[in-house]
Image: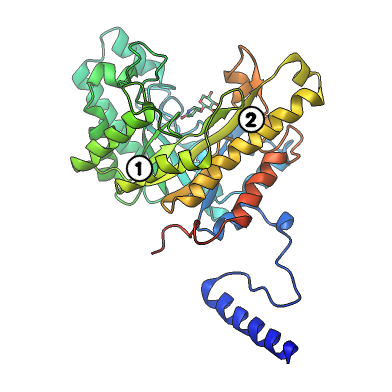
Amino acid sequence: MRLRRLLLVSAAAVALGGTLNVVPVSAGSSPPDPSNQSLKALGQRHNLYIGTAVDMAALDDPADPKYRELVKSEFSSVTAENVMKWESLEPTRGTYNWGPADKLIEFARKNNQKVRGHVLVWQNQLPTWLTEGVANGTISTTELRDLLKKHITNVAKHFKGKIWQWDVVNEAASDPWDSPSSIHLKGFWAQHLGPNYIADAFRWARAADPSALLFYNDYNLEAFGDKGPSDKTYYVYNMVKQLKQSGVPIDGVGSQGHLGTQYGNYNAFQVKEALDAFSGLGLSTAFTEVDVRSQMTAGVQGGDSNEINPRLQASSDNFSVLMQACLANRHCLSFTFWGFTDKHSWVPTWFTDPLEGLATLYDESYQPKRAYYAIKSDLIFAGPPYVLPRGKK
Ligand code: XIL
């Protein structure tokens, strides 16, 4: 009798599993060993795309096959770490270098991966012909605006239909440590074109590729602060609210998620609150550049486990907080790491005083770290009622 009931239950589970696309668990058997499943397979249960930034030199390096293998096997979305930036695409005025970016798009197509386009408008990694031309007065403000429109149009059209999400405008807001400390629009574009370049950029991008989701992307947006004038998350919240209300075609906010273990950081509820605020405006959300760096003290560099272990544990916790918040916000479409191995991470080349590192999921020899398992367990143990698949009603 008891056996019969179990058999019936398991038959029902198989039937359900068939329709809901979940792994059926029949009596007496256990679910598949999660350690054999990739991040992307586990993300799929939630309809959440798991991405990585891709360094094209590493992807193409025959001496480093593991890099390519892991980009393929672990991730369902890719972002060009550098090759879609203006200085890479148009190093000489009027001459485009599409090769490396096209290679990534082709790689993604072959491996059934989505592509996040990064980036259309940013004040960094601009070609020198542009910045110098503006500085020496040979490029006027009117011409600069035309050049930006042309850039967005050409780039978005070139990749039309192949980009899932575009970072249309990146890092436009200042930080509280800037002067003045009240958050404002900063950098090259705001200085030369004034605040309206943001709305213009979204409109030009939409016109060029109507099917891509258009994102505003920035760092230090993980959680609200005091909602005063120096609260960057609150500033960006109000900015995108305004854009939305004015009918500007913006679809999402990308929270970069560059964290460091030396800071206090947040809990998952605080991060979820910020994502919920953005999605409450009718926007999608995404984590777009997640990494968690640590200071590379002499002890860390010397292999002292007393110094290394607390960093690995803190990093794992911080990764996890962002992932849990993303899982809990049904509009959080993708979770992208800014590189996945310490062998190829921007952190030690960028944060040098003091030196920082240890910022990714795998060490320099491609051994998964504690954070990798934490992310996996977040994906495995999350489910209803707090975590529901995204994008489906
Ligand atoms: C970084 C790259 O990782 C580096 O290789 C490059 O030298 C500088 O840019 N925010 C962004 C990314 O939006 O484009 C930056 O990428 C990291 C910070």
Mark 1 burial class by Cα count in 10 Å: few <14, some 14-19, many 20+: many
The nearer-to-camera label among 2 and 1 is: 1
At horizontal 56% and vertical 41% (from top left) the residue drawn is 321
Q: Nearer the viewer, residue 263 or 287?
A: 263
Secondary-structure class at tag 1: helix
Q: Which residue is mark 1?
A: 278
- Which label is found at residue 235? none
* Callout 2 touching callout 1 (CB < 8 Å): no
Residue 348 place in picture, x, y as percent: 63, 21
Q: Nearer the viewer, residue 364 or 385?
A: 385
Q: Is residue 135 left or right of residue 91?
A: left
Give the residue furthest to the top: 136
Q: Which residue is mark 2?
A: 359
Res 56 visible: yes
At horizontal 70% and vertical 57% (from top left) the residue drawn is 34
Of pointers 2 and 1, the one earlier in the residue sequence: 1
Name the amino acid, label 2.
Ala
Indicate the quadrant containing the N terminus: top left, top right, bottom left or bottom right.
bottom right
Q: Nearer the viewer, residue 271 or 203?
A: 271
Vertical placement of 186 versus 136: above or below? below
Indicate the quadrant containing the C terminus: top left, top right, bottom left or bottom right.
bottom left
Q: Is residue 51 left or right of residue 218?
A: right
Residue 152 place in picture, x, y as percent: 31, 35
Mark 2 burial class by Cα count in 10 Å: few <14, some 14-19, many 20+: many
